[in-house]
Image (tube, rainbow, N blue to C red):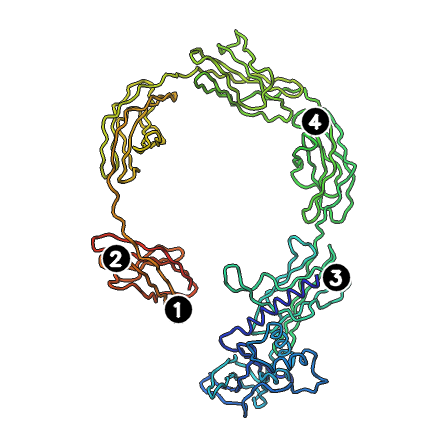
Amino acid sequence: MKKLINNTLLLFLLCAVASLTAQDEGRIFVTNTDGSNVVRIKWVYPALYSTDASDVYRSDDDGSSWEKLNAAPIRKLNAVPLPDAQKTDMMKTLEPELNQGSPADKEGILQIMTAFELVESAPFATYLGLYFEDETALPGENYRYQIRSLRGGDERVLATSENIRVGADVEVLPPRDIDIFVDEEVDSLVKISWLPEETRYFGVNVYRTSERSGIRIKLNENLVIPGREIKPDGSSGYPDFFFNNDEHIIGENYTYELEAVDFFNRASKMSLPVTIEIPDRRPVPAPADVEAVKKNATEVWIVWSNADSENLAGYNVLTARKSDGKYKQLNDEMLPPDQTEFLYKVPEFGDYFFKIETVNRYGVTGESNPTGLGVYDIVPPAAVTGVTAASEAGKINLAWSANGEDDLVGYLVFRSVRADDTRPFVRLNSKALLTTNFTDELPPAARNRFYYKIAAIDTAYNISAFREVVGTVLPDVTPPETPVMSAADVTDAGVNLQWLTVYSEDMAGFEIFRAPVATPDTRVLLNTKLTAADAAGYTDTKAKPGTEYLYTVRAVDITGNVSGYSNAYRVRTKAPPKQYAGAEKLNINTNERKKRVQLKWKIETPDTIRGHVVFRKTARGTFAAVSPLLTGKNEYADTDIKAGRSYTYLVKTYYVEGGVGVSQEKKVKI
């Protein structure tokens, strides 16, 4: 895991240096020198350091007047102002590298090393031309400091500090909003995050104390510097956590503390300690001697030995009707760790299998091997309910509700031509049905009323009583008379159809069909719901303009018998309205500095156009016009915009003859 931590640190450092240096302006940091009134000042350029010279200014008011403090411009030196014996190995590596090329050309690793030495060493910051000590500051005064860069005789403001009171102790505060948690998938992995404050401190040290040893150790070799990363949506933000560590013992408590280090290498006090427990999610071994003993005809004792584990939270008793079946929990609440027996009253006779489930303090379970017990069945299944009978040509379809017995074998179907028991019901199926439906096939012309009843049978061959008897007759299979189409007219509302209605006592309604003239057999049903039985007309509102169709109609009776197709009526619908072209190649450019959105577009027939109107909507709004009618223009600048919002635009083109064309929509985020 140490390698993972180092790689993570390296990634954070790269991102942090990029965050520190990728500014339009530089950054400035000020503090009091401990034990004196000297104010120390450090600063960085957008590329960390620069070959340009710098001047330091101070203001003792609101910043309206500034006093220059340095006699000569401050610039990068040719060598670190330290004897070689006092230079760190990193300084010796950096010094020749930083004296070649421009700061912007330096690689990321070189920038990281430079940033560390800049923070930790005032002589190294002096060598880079990024350090100054104000020894003329007066105790008790409030000052602001400003760095101005010099290039080609021009002076520009690089960065301005907040107020600092001379002589007051500028305390480095520890990180805030600390969040320390155990990974959901890896029990020994602890993840840590805090509130990044780039202007308040440079990095963080992470300390951990084991409850068992009482020794506090620092976990990171280098300062942990949270850095921004590019999110999948292209935005910049911090990752979910900044440091992780998996060197823990399961079940032990650990206390974490964080320490901030500012840009002058000063450490804060420790943060408030956060204690976490590394969870032991390993299941408690289930007892191996589970036994089921019959107490009486319907009650069973389940007994087991104590699992004897400090991590045990309790037990659950599970049962199933098959050893490899789906087990369900018998106890409503978890049994305490010291309970080793459970009394269960079986709901019905049959074979039962039992398991004991252990539950640890984190909800992780373990299961024992199953133990079985047979409770003999002398009780028949419950009477079958919900019996229904539906008839169709030559068939009667029976259905019923399923019984809930676990030892059910199936169902038996009986039929009679009388509802009472003066004549016996005949059993129709030789084997018990596993399903809850049955089809009795009969001669289509039979007109008797048939009666049915269903019985359930279990594994002990117990047969249920009969509770429900249902009866029905076979349906009429004679189709209705074929209707005659009499008229078809085309209107603005659609195609109005009329036919000569069919008079019959069992009429249910009519089906209306439409087909292209070229393929008359490809009929499409227009009405998913039948018309009224006495209907003689229908309006087709969905026919395509300028198309020839053939319309037919069929009659349907209440039993579903369908007549033949009527004669076909040929109709041509009205031609479609003229389409008008919208603006093409809609182009949108944003100018955040000028706070405007510039739109441009093209149109092929400008001579026939009255003008254009630009419409806009927000993410949850609707389109509304944001421009007047633009005549002779193919562009518009929208200045009524706000940063951080998304807008969607479209252009409507208004033609001289009254038509309107609409462009495609374009979305932009400010």
Quadrant housing residue 123: bottom right
Residues under numbered marks 1 and 4 in contact, where contact means CB atoms less than 8 Å apart: no
**Mark 4 → mark 2, Cα distance in angstroms:** 86 Å
Q: Picture coordinates of residue 88 (x, y %)?
A: 70, 80
* Screen quadrant of the C terminus: bottom left
* Residue 591 circle label: 1
- Specify whether 167 is left or right of 541: right
N-term mark: 1 or 4? 4
Residue on which the image places disc 4: 351
| Frontmost residue, 62 versus 575 | 575
* Screen quadrant of the N terminus: bottom right
N-term mark: 1 or 2? 1
Position of residue 135 relative to residue 88, above or below, is: below
N-term mark: 3 or 2? 3
Which circle, 3 or 4, is nearer the viewer?
A: 4
Residue on which the image places disc 3: 211
- Specify whether 465 is left or right of 500: right
Which circle, 1 or 4, is nearer the viewer?
A: 1
How many C-alpha atoms fall within 10 Å of the one at disc 2: few (<14), some, or many (≥20)? few
Which amino acid does the dot numbered 4 rest on? Asp
SS class, disc 1: strand
Q: Picture coordinates of residue 642 (x, y %)?
A: 39, 65
N-term mark: 4 or 2? 4
Which amino acid does the dot numbered 1 rest on? Asn
SS class, disc 3: loop
Q: Picture coordinates of residue 235 (x, y %)?
A: 50, 63
Which amino acid does the dot numbered 2 rest on? Thr
Q: Picture coordinates of residue 533 (x, y %)?
A: 31, 24
| Frontmost residue, 297 versus 33 | 33
